Amino acid sequence: MDKKNLSFLLEGSLKISQEILFSDVKLKINFNKWTSIIGVSGSGKSTLLKIIAGMDLPDVFKSTIKSSNKNYSFSWMAQNDLLLPWASVINNVTLGQKLRGEKLDKERALSLLDQVGLINEVNALPSTLSGGMRQRVALARTLMEDKNIILMDEPFSALDSITRSAMQKLTWKLLKDKTVIMVTHDPLEALLLSNDLYYIIKNKLRSIKLPNSKPFRTVNDENLLYSHKFILNKLEKSYIR
Amino acid sequence: MNYFYKYLFSFIIFITIWWLIQYITDSPSYILPSPYRVFLSIKNNLHLLAYHSIITFLEILVGFILGLIFGMYTGILFIISKSMRKWMLPFIVLTQAIPVFAIAPILTLWIGYGIWSKIIMTVLIIYFPITIAFYDGLKRIDPMIINLAKMMGANTFSMLLKIRIPFALPQLSSGLKLAAAFAPMGAVIGEWVGSSEGLGYLMLYASGRVQIDLMFSSIIILAIFTILLYNFVSYVSNIITRWDPKSHIN
């Protein structure tokens, strides 16, 4: 990637029917950093992520959000693992290459599956795996794609807290040098993982100063707990209105 | 194997009830022949029955394959092109609104007494359930999976072949099972309306000569065909939808 382009900017507003969902969005994404967006349910954070990805939105949405650079490629990881139910773990991981008609790089796929701890489940069907394992397959599939920017839509929210914690650590380990944009409703998760952090309040996107420590942060970090309280207060206000 | 015994068990019960009714009502054999008489009739007319069975079986088979091809093709057209769906769907529903019994004589008039008018009848009967079931399956897919595949650089063709069609297989299987049960009906209706061969023809022929036992023989062979076809389709369906055991009917 070009060294001069260390970041890109998203600007614009988003309406649903006539109602404003976001006004004056200014989102600066730094490369090779982890950027998180926190918001309550229905705040439009997932829609924002879909706009960044350039997905088709339902006709009710009207977006003027523009990116300062359109030449990036994205990969996607969401709460729903989106695995193909008939395809084995390895076939799910190599899906992108199959769809593009490329030669399958099985070696790389196997090494990624080894990294996510699923080397013994290579030929299993998704339905035989637990939620955490399925999400690890999705992670391997995301890594296999090797795109510029990784978009994550509440990737851990369907997991139980123990699995979630392990999954956060694993994901951080494998993605720490990539450009990640994650949307979540969990302030703690965002604080543990992010280099840059935004939250959504009253149709605006605002940035938050993070503790000085570097991710992956620890839960007993005093500054982190302070920030956590601060974000919760802000979000609660926006929730009660 | 267990499955086979269940069929055998149902068959024995069916024969028993039949025999009981015949015994209690003491019906003459030109109204209701006993199971034994029908068995004798099958034995004595083996060559005749085999000849007409092969004709009907061929009609069902070719009709089923053609119906499957046309039905799947239409389902794919519907999912690819919105305007196709808009303009063709009412037309297809319209063809179903006309009873097949009414179309049969016209088909015989246009296409003749041969095997093709029956094949087309079969296609007409199964085309609709296959098209609708397949289209339903094709559009049921989670739109996020489509988005994911687009992000991965899928084109229309690879999306169809590797994502949409596999996802639609459980629904297509339901359509196929319906089609397997209906297909013999199409062929027999076609034969009733005008033919000189086939089990449908043989039924009318036997009825006209008050050979009710021969008529029953034809019906039984047709029923066995239908059961075999259904089970074959069901078996293949279960293999292609191994990953979705919920869609299996056993």
Image (spheres, coloured by chain):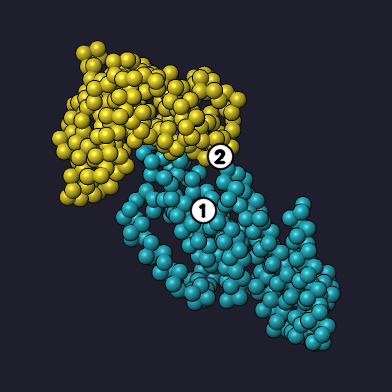
Chain colours: A yellow, B cyan
Select label 2 or label 1 by which is in front. Answer: 2
Name the residue nearer the viewer: A120 or B213.
A120
Label ID, residue B171: 1
Label ID, residue A154: none
Lateral position of residue A171 relative to residue A240, left or right: right
| Disc 2: which residue | A127
* Residue B28 on image: x %, y %: 80, 87
Which residue is outermost to the top?
Answer: A3
Name the residue nearer the viewer: A14 or A212.
A212
**Mark 2 residue element:** helix
Chain of the residue under the numbered disc 2 shown in the image: A
Q: Kindly identify the residue that appears in the image at 29 percent across and 44 percent down.
A: A42
Amino acid on which disc 1 is placed? Gln
Q: Kindly identify the residue that appears in the image at 27 percent across and 29 percent down.
A: A230
Q: Kindly identify the residue that appears in the image at 37 percent across and 28 percent down.
A: A189
Q: Are marks 2 and 1 on the same chain?
A: no
Chain of the residue under the numbered disc 1 shown in the image: B
Amino acid on which disc 2 is placed? Ser
Q: Kindly identify the residue that appears in the image at 51 percent across and 19 percent down.
A: A115
Name the residue nearer the viewer: A220 or B89.
A220
